[in-house]
Amino acid sequence: MIEPARRPPSRGALSSQGDRVFQILILALASIIVLIFLLSLYQLGRESLPALQRFGFRFFTERTWNPVAGTYGAATMIMGTLLTSLVALLISVPLAVASALFVAEYAPKWLANPVGYLIELLAAVPSVVYGLWALFVIAPILGKWQTAFFLNPDNVGTITRCNELWASQQTNLQCFFVPSGAGGRGLALAIIILTVMILPYTASVARDVIRLVPADQREAMYALGATKWEVISRAILPYARAGILGGVILALGRALGETLAVAMVIGDSQEILKSLWGNASTMASVIANQFGDAQETIHRSSVVALGLSLFFLSVIVNYVARLIIARLTPKGIQ
Amino acid sequence: MTAVPILTAHDVNIFYGSKQAVKNVHLEVQRGSVNALIGPSGCGKTTFLRAINRMHDLTPGARVTGKILLDGEDVYGPGVDPVNMRRRVGMVFQKPNPFPTMSVFDNVVSGLKLAGIRDNKRLMEVAERSLRGAALWEEVKDRLKTPATGLSGGQQQRLCIARALAVEPEILLMDEPTSALDPASTAKIEDLMSELKKVTTIIIVTHNMHQAARVSGTTSFFLNGDLVEHGVTDQIFTSPRDERTEAYVTGRFG
Amino acid sequence: MMSTALSTVSRSSAKLSPARRIRNTLMGGLILLATLAVVAPLILIFLYLLREGVGALNLDFFTKTPAPEGETGGGLLNAILGSVTMLAMASVIGVLVGVAGGIFLAEYPRHPLMPTIRMISDVLAGIPAIVMGLVAYGLIVLVFGFSGLAGALALGFLMIPIVVRTTEEVLKLVPLNVREAGLALGLPQWLVIMRIVLPAARGGIITGVMLALARVAGEAAPLLFTAFGNPNVNFDPSKPMSALPLEIYRGATSAYDENQRLAKAGALLLILLIFATSMLARYVTRQRK
């Protein structure tokens, strides 16, 4: 049945010589990733040098950002970035975790898949579309509420008091929650839209780690006579805690760098924050709103210095998030 | 037999990092024979098999010392290209692993085609000869262009044998080739081996002693990285010289 | 003593107390409400754009450039063609470097540079798009001026880490024994990668590229100071170029109704394209499994 070989097989046609060439080629292309990182660092560093040289560390602590006077301190927009991001995170995390629990634990498969998919689509909506929607739909709603507040005779006293306080560049806890305008735009709207935008990031990471919780963890808790909520709160969430935290930090990274939607709605004011409803700015929104118009070198350089700060901030935040996720993953998979 | 052995292992040691998996193995394999490597799991039989075609080159931390001569030539010798060397040695793995995106035909001739042979007539000849050699021709001759992943597990494994035969290897390494298959497919592949030794030499790793007894002419028993005993299969199974071999083949451990 | 305590516990847990039952139901309800709150914005945005934008998605929208400020009519042909041109250029960079990076991470895990490249790729994924715009500004615009090339470069940089990650993931899904079979046949590693592993992972890589494209197609921030925008149709990559997200941004923040109308229609078109791409990618992924 088997015939012996009629021809000697071809040999020496191939060797591992090609492997070395291929590896060098692949490595060269992959190294472009490192090159981009280094070029970014160099570019941002070079351009922000004049500002950092002139202002030094005060750039980060000084609150005055005044292109007319040529004084640039980023403290207000750093505050704006941290405030919008952290508050948005605070609101979105419980919602995101709840939706992840719904998809992973409650919903039947026919519902879990489309809902999970809708949440993924939420992450695919471009920033400018969120900004457009916030401007055209949410801002008028907020504006209506603000107008109603101003027209209510009961509030006249509060409004007068707060206006006086604000005029002297001050605020207090009560006035911080009093509207300072009726346009709908401002810090609050930025927080609202940011909340919506970062929801899917936490939600999808949370869903993935919840699905990785081994069945025996659930079953052990059910076997003790636990209710569904008890299984979730005492077995699933503690087990998935570290992974969810990783997702939260990833979402924080997104929030810190989120630009256009925030730039469109936050009002671009570099004054000290006096009201939750007032105009404000974040580091990213200042870049978007001012870089194109910045004529003087020091202004331009200060804006790029904000970019450099964002660069480092996002590198650190993402690194920490990956560290947490990576540490969790082997445990989750095994 | 006085002919030069097709394979000679001389003082072969294999390390994973600092752990030694195979110790001082000396072994000769004659042309046209079927040789079984047996022993409990973790005894070093698969590790030794993979040293023959330098698959350990790809494992981080793995190191082979000693000499393995293929037809008199040291496979670890200076100037030996592992890629060229592997073309002389065929290998069949535990689980069938056809190339997922290729048809039955393309799988069989992949070794030749990817090496640059484009002559369709010759490829067709090789494919038919190899598939006949692997006792698969009659089953697949009408669907050579269909995806290989559509075949049954047993057919896929015979396809992998045909793929290895197509490059006309001087020696065919089989690493527990039937461990993932049902009894009927296993029987087909065992029958095939007695045919295959007419054209090549087979070294088969198996955890199944009955399989070793059925298919092989010589058997090597490994234990904890040592080659405990090597000899004619009948002798190994009926009158082993080493008591550890006896303990294993009589099922007292392992 | 001990046994009494144990039996008390088991007896009390044998029956579900009303408090536990109520809490269980309540939390289930809250989770459902929260999920509704999460998906509501997506549905609201989509319905809003459909209502406001679909009327403007007419023939003019696809065949004309924007009318001068204050006049009515016009379309976003310049933006559509600009987006397509820049995305095509960005893909060249994104796919070439991204796929090579994915191959490097998946196939050369022992290479000493592997951990560095993996880390930097992950870090790049997190850098805000607007910062990439500043980088491309410094690299290209300072030398050559506002241009489609600068915009495409920024978008390409943003694509790279996404493509790297999906490529690495799908290559790792190709079983090790398939690679071993190729090597055992005496094929060099590069042929095994290019002719056996890569084709096996093709579907996944294409999906990854599509998702990366969908992601950067909606980016306006990195284009603000690079491609800049152009009221006319332009295919010359050395000149300013428009893009859909740029026109949406300008239109949404414009005082003119006509610009706002075009922005809404542009936003509708953009999310329809992005949703279609993600759906297609999802469909392809499911087919493979």
Image (cartoon, coloured by chain):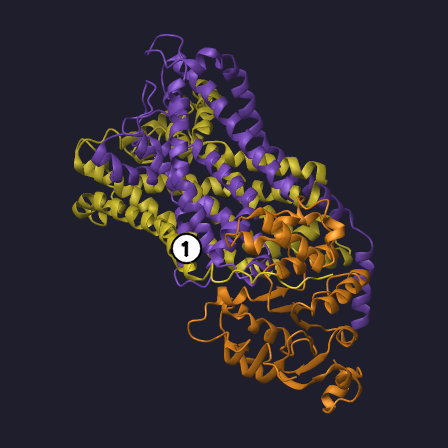
Chain colours: A yellow, B orange, C purple
Foreground residue, C261 or C266? C266
Determine crowd level at label 1: few under 14, some 14-19, many 20+ residues with C-alpha closer than 10 A. Answer: some
Regarding residue C38, the answer to whether it shows in the image is no
Above or below for C256 versus C287: above
Q: Amino acid at mark 1?
A: Phe
Above or below for B23 versus C177: below
| Identity of the residue drawn at 70% across and 66% down | B196
Q: Quadrant of the C terminus of chain A?
A: bottom right
On the image, the x and y values in percent for residue A166 come to 32, 31
Answer with the quarter of the image where residue B38 lies: bottom right
On the image, the x and y values in percent for residue C175 come to 60, 56
Above or below for B69 versus A293: below
Q: Which residue is mark 1?
A: A22
Above or below for B148 versus B45: above
Regarding residue A176, the answer to whether it shows in the image is yes
Foreground residue, B111 or A310? B111
On the image, the x and y values in percent for residue C288 come to 63, 43
On the image, the x and y values in percent for residue A273 come to 34, 35
For the view shown, which residue lies furthest in the front direction?
A6
Answer with the quarter of the image where residue C221 lies: top left
Question: Left or right of C140: which side holds B176?
Answer: right
Question: Left or right of A296: which side holds A217?
Answer: right
Foreground residue, C8 or C67? C67
Q: Quadrant of the N terminus of chain A?
A: bottom right
Foreground residue, B53 or B130? B130
- Disc count in the image? 1
The chain that hosts pointer 1 is: A
Question: Left or right of A86: which side holds C41?
Answer: right
Element at label 1: helix
